[in-house]
Amino acid sequence: MIGHDSVSPFVAGLGGKCPRCGEGALFETFLGLRPSCGVCGLDYSAADAGDGPAVFVIFFVGFVAVAAAFTLRFSWLAPLWLTLLVSVGLTIGLTLLLLRPFKATLIALQYRHKAAEGRLKE
Ligand SMILES: [Zn+2]
């Protein structure tokens, strides 16, 4: 049974699933959305996370990468090449790991809260 609107946005987001049924796939490519859900038929054309996922990922990954670089360089006195290798590796790896679930979660939250552009009442 499809539990419409009972799916947690965070569970759907972490799994990259449809925000309404939690079963259909959300993504067609790495970050590209499918036109609609293959299970419940929800149209994904209104889904737009904008720059939100990138901003959250930049804040988190930037903090982790810089903290790791400072710790390596100044606490453990690691050589510069190792510091750069770890920091750049963390930046690329964490960004690729987190961007998709963040985008899916923000789209699921947008769906849950019916977020859309403002319109004038007529
Ligand atoms: Zn669905």
Image (cartoon, rainbow, N blue to C red):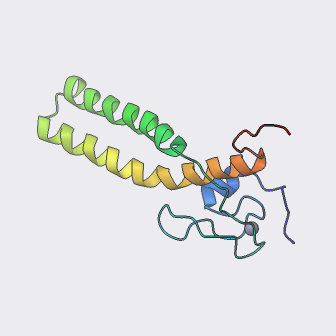
Q: Residue at x 75, y 40 (%)?
A: 119
For the view shown, which residue lies furthest in the top direction?
Answer: 74
Query: In front: 81, or 108?
Result: 108
Q: Residue at x 54, y 41 (%)?
A: 52
Tell me: 48 left or right of 59: right
Query: In front: 116, or 65?
Result: 116
Q: How many marks?
A: 0
Query: In front: 46, or 68?
Result: 46
76 lies above or below 44: above
Q: In which quadrant is the N terminus drawn?
A: bottom right
66 lies above or below 122: above
71 lies above or below 32: above
Q: Quadrant of residue 79?
A: top left
Residue 63 spot, x, y in % from top left = 39, 31
Q: Residue at x 62, y 65 (%)?
A: 26
Q: Residue at x 84, y 69 (%)?
A: 2
Residue 54 spot, x, y in % from top left = 47, 43
For the view shown, which residue lies furthest in the front direction?
Answer: 122
Residue 82 spot, x, y in % from top left = 17, 41
Q: Quadrant of ligand 1?
A: bottom right
Q: Quadrant of residue 20?
A: bottom right
Tell me: 17 left or right of 21: left
Tell me: 113 left or right of 74: right
Residue 122 spot, x, y in % from top left = 86, 39
